[in-house]
Structures are given as C-alpha cells and as structure tokens.
Image (cartoon, rainbow, N blue to C red):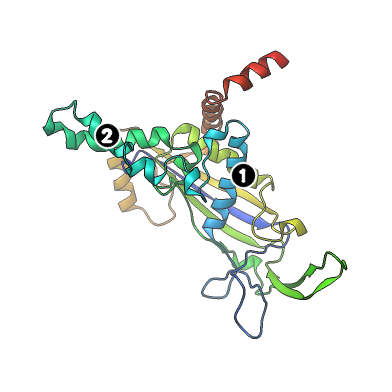
Amino acid sequence: MFDTFKNRLEITGILTTITALRISAGRSSEPIGSDLPVIKDALGNPLIPGSSFKGALRSRLESFLRGINLNLVANPAIEAEWSITNQRLNGSNGIKEEVEEELKQYPEEQRNARRDQILTEKIISETDLISRLFGSPWIASKFQVRDLTVLSNTWFGQYQERDGVAIDRDTETAADGKLYDFQVVPAATQFEFKAVVENAEPWELGLLMIGLHQFETEQIPLGGGRSRGLGVVKLEIEKMYWLDVNNDPNKLLIYLQELVNSNPGDKLPSYQDVKQLSLKQDWTNSLINHLRDNIPTSSTTEATQNS
C-alpha cells in the first residue's frame, strides 16, 4: 500500500548564501589546516547535504505545528516520544496484534490480501503529521532532497578562515587553550537545489509549500554559527512540475512511455507547471483546513470568545 505510485512533484531551484555558511564536517585530524573544515565533495568543492536542508525544514514546520496542537508532532530523536513506538507496533496488544484480531472477521482466504491494507491504515492513522511527510523508523519519507552541489560560476575555490574562542565566565577573557578556527563558504555562493515528493496528500504538499516559503524569505538559517549571523540563505524556486495519475492506469502508462522516450532534464508532456496553475494555493488551503480540524476544542472556544 505504501509504495503504490499516485503522484509526483519535482522542484528545482537555486540556494544562495546571503551570509557566510558553515556546515562542518567535524573536527579535522590533519596537523595543518582548519580545526573545523566545511563538508566537501570528492573534488574539494563545498557541499550542503540534503539531510541538513531537510532537517532544518522539518524543525521549522514542527515548531509551527506544536503551536497548533502538540499531538501533531513527535520527537524523532527520542523513541519514547515517537507517535508509534516499537512497543506500540510490535508489542503485546500492539498494532500488529490488533490487525490479526481484526482479520478474524474475514474468511481465511481473504486475510492475506487484507492484512497489508488494514496495517497500512492503522499505521497512518496513528502517525503524526510531520512523520507522514518526512518519514520515521516505521514509515518511509515522501520528501527527498538531493545533496546541494555548488554552481561553479559562483565558486572561486576559496574558503574563508575565521577564529573562534571560548570565553572564561569568571575573567571574561579568552579561556586557556580554547582558541580554534573554522572554515566558512563565502556569501553569494550558489548551490543547485533539487527535490522530489511522491504520493503526497494535498495538505502534505501545503505543509511543504509553507516550509519552502520560509527558505524563500530567508527565515530558516543553515549550519552552525547562527548566533554569529552565519547561515542565512535564500531559496529561489525555478520550476515545480506536478504529475497526478489520479488512480488512472492509462495516465501512468503514458507517463512511463514518455520517460522511456525522453532525455534527462526534459519536461514531460504529462507534467503540469505548478506556477501556471492555482495548485500551490489549493494545497495551502487544504493544509489550513486540515489543521483547523486538529485545533484543541479549548483553543477554539477561547478564540471565539476573544473575537
């Protein structure tokens, strides 16, 4: 059930560093060089891991949803705070046992066919909203971001070296032995952005549109040193192509045929240009309506009384 192809959204654009960017590869073991070098590709060029972009986006959207209802978000770092723990999935009286119990109402020859459907429905119903889009240990992510590679015409092969130091709280001077240096990617460096979303619900796409808009308006910094003013970036989305087969096998067959006959990078006839349609607004409206249904009753009552 999870892997049935329904729709696909392809997003491409340019991410520009407004201030210097520091995404560290960890402390260097080299005797000569920066203490904290930036992440580089095999050719020594700066690289922004797709996971760094995706993690910053997820964190911002989690903060929004917590402001609406704490139950809409789980903590991916602590299993006890997952919306579906391992115990809830596999333990005694867990989801899998509930599925087997429910299957008893069906003839034995139908149980195998229904098991996957019932299990999928139960898992999705208990999964928090963020995990449904970004993934979790029990459900695959619908949103994939490629590593962001630098555009050669904006990169001149130079890194900036900056100094850092820990301050002794008693003397208010540099702490002994705490001086270090780190690399940053200069401002005005551009990176290629590519992302894909598959099998997303309209409200999930609306959630993604709000998150990407935060990057478009320079409101989500990346990397370390943000309190120093580092990591301010701006995303400019160039293309958003949408394909919805709408459970129509013929549409899917046409799309597959176009894939075989196309060259890499071609816009396929089956794709719709999101910018030329009202889809972005439709998806955002779908999200707002979905979230309104999840506002706690007490919050709704207070808002009505204050209006």
Q: Is residue 18 above or below residue 110?
A: below
Tag of residue 209: none
| Quarter containing the C terminus | top right
> Which of pointers 1 and 2 lies earlier in the amino acid sequence?
1
Tag of residue 99: 2
**Three-letter residue code for mark 2:** Val
Binning the other alpha carbons within 10 Å of mark 1 as few (below 14), some (14 to 19) or many (20 upward) gives some
Q: Does residue 94 appear left or right of residue 283 in this picture?
A: left
Does residue 249 appear in this view? no
Binning the other alpha carbons within 10 Å of mark 2 as few (below 14), some (14 to 19) or many (20 upward) gives some
At horizontal 76% and vertical 75% (from top left) the residue drawn is 179
Q: Does residue 294 appear left or right of residue 98 in this picture?
A: right
The residue that disc 1 covers is: 60
x then y, percent, for residue 79: 47, 48
Residue 158 quadrant:
bottom right
Residue 116 quadrant:
top left
